[in-house]
Amino acid sequence: MANTSARTLRLLSLLQTHRHWSGLELADRLGVSERTLRRDIERLRELGYPIGAARGTDGGYQLAAGAVLPPLLLDDEEAVALAVGVGDAAQSGIAGMEEASLRALTKVVRVLPPRLRARVDALRAMTLSAAASGPVVAAGVLTAVAQACRDEERLRFGYTARGSAPTEREVEPHRVVALGGRWYLVAYDLGRHDWRSFRLDRLTEPAATGTRFRPRTLPAEDAVAFVQAASGAPVPYTVEVLVHAPASRVRQAVGRWGTVDPLDQDSCRLTMTSVSLDWPTQALGNVGAEFEVLGPPEFAAHVQEWGARFVRATRAPG
């Protein structure tokens, strides 16, 4: 029974992270016969998961949008709140949070019925928060683009570049990047025969074409570096500091905008990522404790400059 339960969870995970699976593909992934696969599909349906099936040479299985989120048993209000909260977390700027939140948002939105998706988009568009400081991107756009990247499937969409007329694009999507409060798609543009970055808030009606492709080699260290070079966005600093104060006190002062690793009862390592060195300097001042700059050199020089300025401000005139 334990093996059956584990296999069923694995099946559900595969269905949640892929647009469409043939029966043979799924059976091979799970290491079972197609007959056993059909029983497992029925078991998920009994739990309330809306799994569509198609017969014939192009037949297979796909998780459809449904009216509930089994087995979470969320009502409509809870489902909308969850999707909005995860969407904001994806744009929080916290290191490592964007990708995990995007995966979670993709899974949640895929099983939301259309009426709830519309509510999610409306609520996010009309709500301001410290986490989402850039243009709001519809959850449906974000998840459709992310799925095409993961499935290595060509994507069509409308796009309006700044100061230009709307155009239709077909691309081979590579990665979704969250940078500077905005979302970008890095992709190979089949019409321009070159790599491009596209702002998702300027992208409309993304639709997967059903055509798979072999990934090309990106002409950059990674997708983030490509977007930074294309957009002229500043490269963020990663500041590391040894703080002579308990970890709990430092966490209270910096909140979620820094990572605090305890070293002992009275000291910890604080790591902050920011495009500006002013904010980490202010945050350390708020802690009110002795600290040592571990890096980078630019931050050490920045703190020295601030310190010298404050010392000059306290000197008596004349």
Image: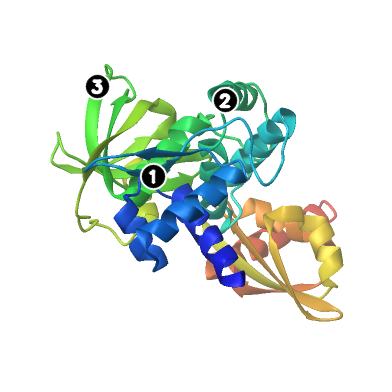
Element type at marker 1? strand
Badge 3 local density, few (<14 within 10 Å), some, or many (20+)?
A: few
Instruction: Name the residue rendered at 86%, 65% in the picture.
Output: 249
Residue 120 is drawn in which quadrant?
A: top right
Quarter of the image where one finds residue 73? top right
* Vertical order, 253 against 136 (above or below): below
Q: What's under tag 3, amino acid-wise?
A: Thr
Q: Which residue is situated farthest in the top direction here?
A: 165
The quadrant of the rendering that contains the N terminus is: bottom right
Q: Is residue 234 visible?
A: no
| CA–CA distance in space, label 3 to label 2 | 24 Å
In percent of width and height, residue 85 lies at: 67, 39
Residue placed under numbered mark 2 in the picture: 121
Vertical placement of residue 118 versus 250, above or below: above
Q: Position of residue 61 (x, y in %)?
A: 39, 44
Of tags 1 and 3, the one toward the viewer is 1
Q: Are marks 2 and 1 in contact (CB under 8 Å)?
A: no
Q: Residue at x 19, y 54 (%)?
A: 214
Q: Which residue is mark 1?
A: 61
Residue 159 position, x and y percent, is 31, 25
Categorize mark 2 by other alpha carbons within 10 Å: few (<14), some (14-19), many (20+). Answer: many
- Read off the residue under disc 3: 167
- What residue is rendered at 73% in x and 32% in y? 75
Q: In the figure, is residue 203 to the left or right of 69?
A: left
Pick whichever, 212 or 236, lies toward us: 212
Q: Is residue 112 above or below residue 222?
A: above
Q: Nearer the viewer, residue 36 or 145?
A: 36
Q: Nearer the viewer, residue 152 or 66?
A: 66
